[in-house]
């Protein structure tokens, strides 16, 4: 009998997703284990490459194949635990990714590369001086070091603390002091202002008690904006750590949530590991180790933090669970919520999904009993919710007001400025304002098959990017016959110009992709506004997340129509969420808040329900619509994207691929196949883009067949055409 290892090779050359069999020679036989990182020869040149041991098998000589041998075991301790391997299988099955994509999510590059810990030599105390004379001469310095045992290096003691180098050396020589290697962590050591504990409100208290007492593992914490969800999270985290477990708190985007970091660092201090995509490789390596070694029990981070090797994971919190950023757009294209649930089953930990505006999927699961619903219905200190007002922009046009501000918004801004209060003006730039609408009556051109807005093309055609339906753009409105049928669009720069023109005395700050490119740009703008250095903050969805500025009394939503008409089946949900979230920035301090929503479609259900704070009403209507159209949570979407520099070749490839996939589709008549069509963004970085979409209940076995056929079909043109698969994609652009 011989020992063989099934190994996943860490190589980008591969377009195949399978383990390779390697022989384990005598030398390694007793040491090799599942999950280890090893070195194996790979490719025609037998380049020494990293590999992961997926499993071992014991057989007589495997015949007929040229079997290569494992060359080295990199670390004795496995880098992947058996839980990790289960997670990897889950990611492969659910998101149709490759082994290596999943492994790379769990193991940072720095670990693979063997990035070294940074260390320094600190001075430690060994023993006290007994000799009276010596004590007189050296006592003071020894006692200082004893009090700061292991804290400083020799050079820190002499240069910064001004202690005598001669004396320290003498004490080391006579073994009163010693040197010791200490790991220095390359992590955020910034000091944060302490964020004190609050006396819980009754609602907060009840929520925490319910979660503590219940045997459930999944919770939806639905709390209105300003209800103090963070305080609930913190109490639960505290409890978890007290019980010797660790906790993960996920936020939608770390750079956009300075406040969350401030609060958690301010309460839990060094115990917190921060993890997100802006870390350097060294920082990432160190935070990974800090968590792995049990030195950081609380992780705060963006979605990738979920994959850190937390010890005894007891709690996962997903704040603003409805946010788009929880869906990864790189392989594996996972949905964080689903992975958290899987981890909960695997490790038995609790998961809290928090939001003022839960995703339709999560709320559906909560009311159908799959998660426990916990609600916070009041703001802290019984502060009233801001008053919402919808302004019909069609009337503004009729009365001759051509500016982007309605009379109502114009007056309210002036009023707030006069009272020295702050104002947020919000303009949605998510997606693409490529729709065509009538300014006279608000009519929007939509695809009758897919119920999403059609996209304008320069040649004067309207195209549905779900199913490909194309028609010529009418010159007059089919509803009211007005000639004001136009392409819709406005940018933050334009809003800023108008603000300067209409409110010349106001100090204006702007937060969008253009003004936040620098490393701390976002935080600087946030701090300026917080410190009252601006009267008006103009921003995109960046400003909708979790900001708590007490002096903001007015929020103006410049054009709700943009989010209503993004070509996405979730546009109503996104509109409802963004209005509620952005509106929730108003009136968080002493003074009452007001929200003005400008739109050409004032009767749109997403707006009306948001205005009335009627989540349930919105949910019921939206849920019914989803059912009618077969969109999630009633079914799934599977998106296949193809891209290539060669447009003609891509087109032919996608058409032939579609014929192949149609054959599979024919065995599953209840699944809809849409396309192939060009994507909404037809070209990115010189690459043309096409897509095919499947919609309906998609059994795993169907998805697997599609995946296998796709990769098989792509094999011969791997270098010319890139393909990808996405389950329930964020957007279909
Ligand atoms: P949410 O995330 O639910 O919108 P936050 O957690 O930001 O709300 O809380 C809103 C505000 O209320 C914050 O300024 C917070 O410090 C404050 N707060 C939260 N809980 C309490 C409490 N129990 N007592 C006093 N203030 C509180
Ligand atoms: Zn019209
Ligand atoms: Zn369509």
Image: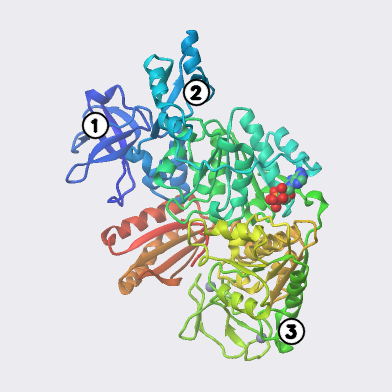
Looking at the rendered structure, which numbered label has been put on residue 395? 3
Determine which residue is flagged by label 1.
Answer: 23
Q: Nearer the viewer, residue 94 or 579?
A: 579
Q: Spatial distance from mark 3 to mark 2, Cα to Cα?
A: 76 Å
Looking at the rendered structure, which numbered label has been put on residue 145? 2
Q: Spatial distance from mark 3 to mark 1, Cα to Cα?
A: 78 Å
Which dot, 1 or 2, sits closer to the camera?
Answer: 2
Q: Spatial distance from mark 1 to mark 2, Cα to Cα?
A: 55 Å
Find residue 1 and report its image quarter: top left
Looking at the picture, does residue 694 appear above or below residue 24? Answer: below
Beta carbon at label 3 within 8 Å of ligand 2? no
Tell me where residue 58 appears, x and y as whole percent: 29, 27
Element type at marker 2? helix
Looking at the picture, does residue 571 appear above or below residue 728? Answer: below
Find residue 196 and report its image quarter: top right
Q: Which color mode does the image show?
A: rainbow
Looking at the picture, does residue 340 appear above or below residue 326? Answer: above
**Residue at (64, 37) in percent of width and height:** 237
Looking at the picture, does residue 700 appear above or below residue 113? Answer: below
Element type at marker 1? strand
Earlier-in-chain disc, 3 versus 1: 1
**Residue at (70, 80) in percent of width and height:** 393
Density class for disc 1 (Cα within 10 Å; few <14, some 14-19, many ≥20) is many
Density class for disc 3 (Cα within 10 Å; few <14, some 14-19, many ≥20) is some
């Amino acid at each position: 009998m011989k020992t063989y290892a099934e190994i996943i090779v860490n190589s980008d050359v591969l377009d195949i997703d399978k383990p390779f069999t390697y022989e384990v020679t005598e030398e390694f036989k007793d040491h090799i284990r599942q999950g280890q990182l090893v070195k194996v020869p790979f490719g025609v040149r037998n380049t020494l490459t990293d590999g992961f041991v997926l499993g071992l098998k014991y057989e007589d000589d495997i015949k007929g194949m040229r079997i290569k041998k494992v060359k080295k075991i990199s670390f004795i301790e496995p880098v992947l635990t058996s839980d990790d391997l289960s997670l990897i299988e889950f990611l492969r099955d659910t998101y149709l990714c490759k082994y290596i994509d999943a492994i790379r999510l769990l193991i940072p590059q720095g670990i693979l590369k063997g990035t070294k810990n940074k260390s320094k030599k600190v001075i430690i105390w060994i023993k006290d001086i007994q000799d009276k004379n010596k004590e007189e001469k050296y006592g003071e310095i020894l006692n200082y070091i004893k009090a700061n045992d292991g804290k400083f290096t020799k050079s820190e003691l002499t240069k910064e603390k001004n202690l005598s180098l001669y004396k320290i050396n003498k004490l080391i020589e006579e073994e009163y002091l010693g040197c010791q290697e200490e790991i220095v962590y390359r992590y955020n050591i910034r000091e944060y202002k302490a964020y004190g504990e609050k006396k819980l409100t009754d609602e907060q208290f009840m929520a925490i008690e319910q979660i503590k007492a219940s045997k459930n593992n999944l919770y939806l914490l639905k709390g209105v904006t300003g209800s103090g969800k963070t305080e609930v999270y913190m109490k639960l985290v505290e409890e978890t750590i007290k019980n010797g477990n660790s906790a993960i708190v996920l936020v939608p985007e770390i750079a956009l949530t300075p406040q969350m970091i401030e609060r958690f660092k301010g309460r839990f201090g060094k115990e917190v590991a921060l993890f997100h995509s802006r870390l350097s490789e060294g920082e990432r390596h160190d935070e990974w180790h800090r968590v792995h070694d049990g030195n950081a029990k609380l992780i705060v981070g963006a979605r990738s933090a979920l994959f850190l090797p937390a010890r005894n994971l007891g709690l996962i919190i997903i704040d603003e669970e409805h946010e788009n950023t929880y869906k990864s757009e790189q392989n594996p294209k996972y949905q964080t919520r689903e992975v958290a649930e899987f981890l909960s089953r695997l490790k038995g930990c609790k998961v809290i999904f928090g939001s003022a505006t839960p995703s339709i999927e999560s709320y559906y699961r909560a009311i159908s009993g799959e998660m426990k619903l916990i609600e916070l219905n009041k703001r802290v200190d019984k502060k009233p919710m801001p008053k919402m007002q919808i302004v019909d922009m069609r009337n503004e046009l009729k009365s001759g007001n051509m500016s982007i501000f309605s009379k109502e918004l114009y007056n309210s801004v002036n009023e707030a400025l006069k009272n020295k209060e702050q104002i947020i003006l919000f303009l949605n730039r998510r997606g693409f304002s490529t729709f065509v609408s009538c300014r006279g009556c608000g009519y929007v051109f939509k695809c009758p098959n897919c119920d999403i807005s059609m996209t304008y093309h320069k040649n004067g055609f309207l195209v549905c990017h779900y199913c490909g339906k194309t028609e010529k753009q009418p010159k007059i409105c089919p509803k009211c016959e007005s000639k004001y049928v136009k392409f819709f669009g406005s940018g933050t720069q334009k809003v800023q110009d108008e603000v300067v023109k209409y409110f010349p005395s106001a100090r204006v700050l702007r937060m969008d992709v253009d003004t936040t490119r620098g490393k701390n740009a976002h935080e600087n703008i946030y701090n300026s506004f917080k410190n009252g250095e601006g009267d008006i903050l103009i921003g995109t969805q960046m400003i909708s997340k979790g900001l708590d500025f007490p002096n903001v009394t007015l929020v103006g939503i410049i054009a709700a129509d943009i989010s209503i008409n993004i070509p996405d089946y979730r546009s109503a949900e996104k509109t409802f969420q963004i209005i509620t979230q952005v509106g929730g920035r108003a009136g968080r301090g002493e003074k009452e808040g007001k929200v003005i929503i400008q739109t050409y479609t004032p009767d749109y259900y997403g707006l009306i329900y948001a205005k009335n704070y009627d989540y349930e009403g919105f949910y019921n209507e939206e849920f019914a619509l989803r059912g009618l159209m077969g969109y999630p949570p009633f079914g799934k979407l599977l998106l296949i994207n193809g891209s290539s520099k060669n447009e003609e070749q891509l087109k032919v490839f996608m058409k032939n691929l579609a014929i192949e996939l149609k054959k599979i589709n024919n065995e599953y008549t209840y699944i809809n196949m849409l396309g192939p069509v060009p994507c909404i963004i037809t070209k990115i970085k010189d690459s043309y883009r096409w897509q095919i979409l499947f919609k309906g209940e998609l059994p795993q076995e169907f998805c697997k067949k599609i995946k296998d056929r796709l990769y098989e079909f792509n094999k011969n043109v791997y270098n010319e055409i890139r393909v990808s698969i996405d389950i329930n994609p964020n957007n279909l652009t």
